[in-house]
Structures are given as structure tokens and as C-alpha cells.
Amino acid sequence: MTDSVLSPILDLFVMLAVIGGAVLMLGAAIALSSRLVGRLRQRSYERAASGELVRHELTPTRAGEIDAATATAMVRGLHPRQRRGLDRWRVGWPSSELRVVWRDGELRWQVEGHRHALDEFAVSHRALHLVSDSRPVERVEPPAVATAVGRRARPSSWPLRTADVPGDRVLHRLAAALESACPPGVEVRFRIHLRPIPPDAWRERIDPDPGGARSMLALIGEAVVDGLLLRESGAGREAPTPPTALERDARARKRRGAAGFETALLLEVAGPTFEEAKALLWHLTDATDSLADAGQEIRWEVVPGLARQAPASVFADWEVAQLWYLPDETFDAAELPRPRPLAGALPPTAPIGDGIVIGTNGDRPLAVPLATLDRHLAVVGSTGSGKSTLLLNVVTGLLDTNWGSTVIDPHGDLVADILARIPARHADRVHVLRLADLDHPRGFNFFERRTPTEGQLVVSEFAALFEDLWPRFTGPRMLDILRYSALTMLSVPEPQTVLELDRILSDDAFRAPYIDAATDPAVQNYWRTRWPSRGSDDSSVGAVQNKLGAFIAYDSIRAVVGQGTSTLRPRTIMDRGDVLLVDLSGVGGDNASIFGGMLIARYRIDALGRQGTDPASRRPHLLVVDETPRFSTRALGGLVNEGRKFAVTVGLATQTLKDIGAALGATAVANAGTIALMSPGLEDAKALAPLFAPLTPADLLGMERHGMALKTAGRGGRDVVYGGIVTPPGPADPEIAAEILAASDKRDARPRNEVAAEVTERLTWMPPTPLRAVGGAGKVKVARGQQLPGGE
């Protein structure tokens, strides 16, 4: 009886057990197969998309305040929010890798992932002004000799601590440790591999709901299991233990993550021995200690070589942003090492028109269009910023155009650098004037006239030069003496020099024939009524002579300016498109400034002399004035204002605009078609920032060494601001430099003894009476031995 009663019950129990087991097995099979299929599809997607993996190196913008929300948004940008697919089977979540690389003493930020994802990433962060440049780099690097593998110490549901002190953040600590402990030639890579967690799965992880809606299959399975285990149903069981306050806080912090990633942490060292790398890694892994608290931390394990299978932990987006973020103002305030971003926008991929390449921005050339160069060039920057290198690039770049150029260099280094980099094919166009070279004196006569009427312009420029060079010691009376003495000297048609001008001021007998030859009534009247009664003993006359003494006292300068016929003429150099390199070193600072100012004034005279020529026939010429403050004269300002009409362009180089004076500084800023700022001072950064918008004074002040912000003409002629690094000069060729200099000596210099004889004669001869006046007819008859030096 008992058996008959129990048998059906047992049969029913067995049947229910079999059905429950089958249901459980079916549910497990479905769950396992779904997960397995997902993994297979993910692996198939990753394998197919591996050819699209690229690595970009980021150039962060000027360091500002990057808050936690912005840093988290950057990381979140790597989560696509939905699967990506190549076809119906190959569907998955695109992985990416955030990287920080220590190389050559600097920390570099990189990101690696699928091409389309990184393109979107770069565009969005440039739009937010977080990244000024993102350029692809090779995915090739030296092999790791040791790797530190990081993982959470406790389950991923417990979040990391937030680093409260900016300077105590992970990358701040890592950069400081690398700077102090990393040997030269060692490369360190901090890699954070990210695989997005599907949004539904992430919500389930951060906010599980025990009482939420479940599927019928899950309910049946639970009921069967409860029956088999002879336990109360879920509805009748006791509620789980409520979380503690710390657990509630941890869950709340974890929920801040809008996206989650399966994350692998690797810190690799390449270059040293394993033992050295291991010691370095244990020192560097302390960087993550700022994220540790009583509930969670990152623990590291050092293994030899490259870790092939790094364990994955679940990180929220904000937790990843604690490990990888762009440098902020506290990073730069601590002077932690990193490449400084380039001011300005990326230049075009190719120079505009016939541009002269002066620098680069990554793989893009940075060029000055010739159409803009004819509106002058101004280079402003501190010592050692690369101004001279930029000028070198401009001058050598012009060699293959129809432009000519002149370089006035008070120190001689720029001239030597240019000379050693001129191709042999251009050697016959190059002239060199070394003012201190006694053995090969060139001839430069400021008072040389192309036409009889040019004398007044020459005198006017010479008087203005005196006033500019000695503003505190040049009064109206002194200028009157200088002006009328020079006009008197030029009353005769034969070549006259500064040597004759000095003698007119000091020697009554020498002066008299010149006065008699003067045909201008104003000149004659001056000597009759306004010449000081004390003559050459008058203090004003002595003041003029003191200043002329700079040209007469030093034999090297006297040999150049004391020749009646110039061997180097600015007008000829401009019209031929030649190159003149002027080295003013070795004669003293004051003498260099005087001669350079005189040469600039002569260029203005000869530029104005082009007025009567066909504009189409005027070959463009660039006059480069290095260390412009030493030559800040009205003649230079006049060339900036008017030179363009006569195809003469000026290139100015100064440490500050204040140094060249308010008038010339304002003229340069107003007229320069191209302005290059290279590590400018605070005052110039503030004054010029409106011209370089959207860059700020802080942007301009934060440029790296040899970096520049370039305001020039873009496509369509509109002004645009580009950023770049000055291209370093190519290799020097001392043999070519020596050959060009020897050729110039032969072509442009006169024998030293011949020049010395002419100078001596000009200092000692006495003019005949009467002298032939300008415009006079016929030859003057002079006694033997009394011909005019340099005359016909």
C-alpha cells in the first residue's frame, strides 16, 4: 500500500527533476552558446579590423585647467555606445589603447585604435581645443625587457579613490619619477588597453536590481532548483544583508561612470638590462598610490619581457581618466617635461604658390609666400629662439627665385652660416663685404652719385643718419654745418668721399676751391654769412668732425669708404638679383652701427632711384637687417614705408619691438605682411596677441625652443596664423664657403696697396683753382700731380 502510494509521487518527482535538469541545461546551453557566439564574433571582428589599427601622437594645447569632467569626456569618447560591424558576422566592440611614452627626456601622449574611431576622437578634441595636433606615428617600438602588470586588488565593484591634489595625480607623479630616475636612452611606455563594455551590461554591473523583472525561464529554473534543494522559494527567503555606508558610497561613486571598459594596465621598459628595468619599474609603479584607499588599490607584478596576456579589470570612464589625462596648468607649473605645443593652426600640406619654406609642423612645410614677402618680414623673439636660423632659411630659399638679397650682420655668424650653405651654382651671384678685412678692401662710397641731381638726396640721407645715430648730440646748428659742407663737396662732378668732407670742415685752403665751384646761391651764401666765425675751431664743427672720425680713424673702414669708385653698389646688386653678405664684426659696435646705418641709407637712395624705371623691370630684393635695434634709422623706416613701391623688401629681426623704437616698431607691425613670433617677451606677446588670434598671450609665451607663431597670408590672401618649428640649417660646406669668398675677393676687392695709395692721396692732395662745377662744360685744366683723386 505504501509503495503504491509513494510510487506515483516518486515518479512525479523524478519527472520534475528530469524536466528541471533539462531546463537548466537548456538555459545554461543558451547562455553559454550566446556568450560563445559573442566572443567568436568579437574575435572575428578584431582580426578583420586589425589592418585598420593606427596610432596617433597627440599634441595637447596650451596647458590650462582641464577639469575632471573634461578628462572623463575624453575617455568616454573612445566608447562607441554600440557595436561596429564589417558584415553580418564580424561584429564587435572596437578596442583602443591610451598610451603615455617617455622618450628623449619628454612625456608624449598617444592613442591607438581603429582608424575611423581615432579620426572622430581627434576631431572632437580639436574642436574642444584640447588637442592642437594629432598625427599618425609608426606602430614600431623597441621591445620591452620588463613589464609591470597592474590589476585591482579587490573586486571591480569597489572603485578607485579620486586624487584630490592636482600635483599628486598619476601622470604628474610618473613624469616626476621618470625625470629623476630614468637613465638616458631608456624608453618607458604606460599602456591602458580598453575594450568597451556594452551599455546594458555596464548598467547591470553598476546597479544590479535583485527585485527587477526576470525572464520566465529564469523563474522556472529558480523554482526547480528550490524544489530540488528543498528550500523556501525566493519570495519567502530573507532579504539580503543591507550594504554598509562604505559600500553604499562605493556603489554611488561607481555609478558616476556613464561608460565602462575592460581594462588592462601595462608599464613597459625598453633599453636597459632586466635587473635595471625591474628596479626602475618598482620605482615608477608608486605613481598609482595616490588612487589607493582602504577598499581598493592597483597592485603591480613585474615580469620579464612583454606581457602577452594581461589580466583585465573593469574600470569606469572616470577611473580611466584618473590614469590618463592631458597635462593641465599644474603640470606645466611644475615644469614637468613634455613637448610644448606649436602655436597656431596646422599649415597647408604644401606651400602656397612659390613659398619659401622656413619651418615645419610635423610632416607639413611651413612657408612664407613670395606674394606676402614683398610686404616685408618682421621676426621678434628672445635670444636663442632661432631668429637667425629663420633668416638663413629665407635667404637661401630665395636663391632659386628671381629675388636678390642683402644681409647686414653685426656679428658675422649669420653671414658665415649662409655662406657655407650656398649651392655652387649660385656662387657667381654672391658678394661678401667683411668690414674688418684689411687685405681685401671693397669699395663703398656713400657719396657716389648716379646722376648730378642725386647729390641733394645723398646729403639729406647722410644728415638724417647723423641725427638718428646721435640724437642727443645733434642739434640744428651741427646739422646745418654737415649739410652745407656735404653740398659744397658735391658741387664738383668727380667722386668725393667722407675723407674730403672732413677736410672741408678742417682745412680753409682745401675748402676754398670747392666754395668757388659751388653754383647754388644758398651754398655760397652759407659760407659768406653763416659759417662760424671761429671756423674749424667752433665746437659745432668739432662735433661733426668727431663723428666723422669713426670713418677716418680706423684703417679698415677708411679703406672701404675712402675709395672714390664703389666696387659694391646697392643699385647694381638689386638690379642683377645678386646677393650681398655684409659682415660687420671685428670693428667695434659703434663703427658697425655707423657703417650699417650708412649702407641702409644708401639702399633707400638707390630704391628711390628706381622711380623712373618700368615697375615690371624692378627685380625684387630683400634687405635683411639682423639685430635691427643697432640700425634703427629713418632710412630703414622709410624703406618699410615706401620700399615695396620700388620692389625693395625689408626683413627685420629684433628681440623686442621696444628696442627698435616706437616709430619703427609701429611701422613694422602695420606694414609687415609676415610676422614671426619666437619666444617673445611678455610686453610683445600682449601687444601682438590681437594680430595672432585666436592665440592668447599665454599661448605665445609658452612656445617651445625654436617654435614660432607665423602670421602671414593664407589661401585667398587672408591673414592666417600658423604654428611650426624652424627648420634647422642643412650641413655646412666650408670648402664652398672658401671658394665663394675667394671669388668675391677677386671680383669685388682692390689690391690693398692700391687702395692705400688712393686714401693717402685723398688725405693730402690740394685741389686746383678753379674746380670744375657739377654740370660745367669741358675738362678742368690742372697742374701735373694735382688731378682729382678718382677723377677721369
Image (cartoon, grey):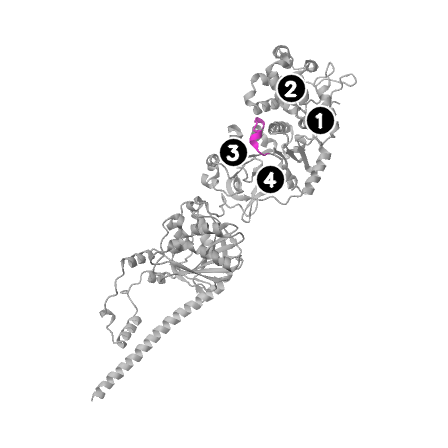
Q: Are marks 2 and 1 in contact (CB under 8 Å)?
A: no
Q: Rounded to the nearest whole Å, what is the CA distance between mark 2 and mark 4?
A: 38 Å
Q: Earlier in the sequence, mark 2 or mark 4?
A: 4
Residue tagged by mark 4?
Answer: 394
Point out residue 529 in the picture as x, y percentages from the top left corner: 62, 10
Most foreground residue, 615 or 195 = 195
Point out residue 789 in the picture as x, y percentages from the top left corner: 73, 22
Residue 480 located left or right of residue 281: right
Q: Rounded to the nearest whole Å, what is the CA distance between mark 4 and mark 1?
A: 31 Å
Q: Rounded to the nearest whole Å, what is the CA distance between mark 2 and mark 3?
A: 36 Å
Q: Earlier in the sequence, mark 3 or mark 1?
A: 1
Give the number of the mark in front: 3 or 4: 3
Q: Residues within 10 Å of mark 4 (few under 14, many from 20)?
A: many
Residue tagged by mark 3?
Answer: 656
Residue segment shown in magenta: 625-635
Q: Rounded to the nearest whole Å, what is the CA distance between mark 3 and mark 4?
A: 20 Å
Residue found at x 54% / y 22%: 472
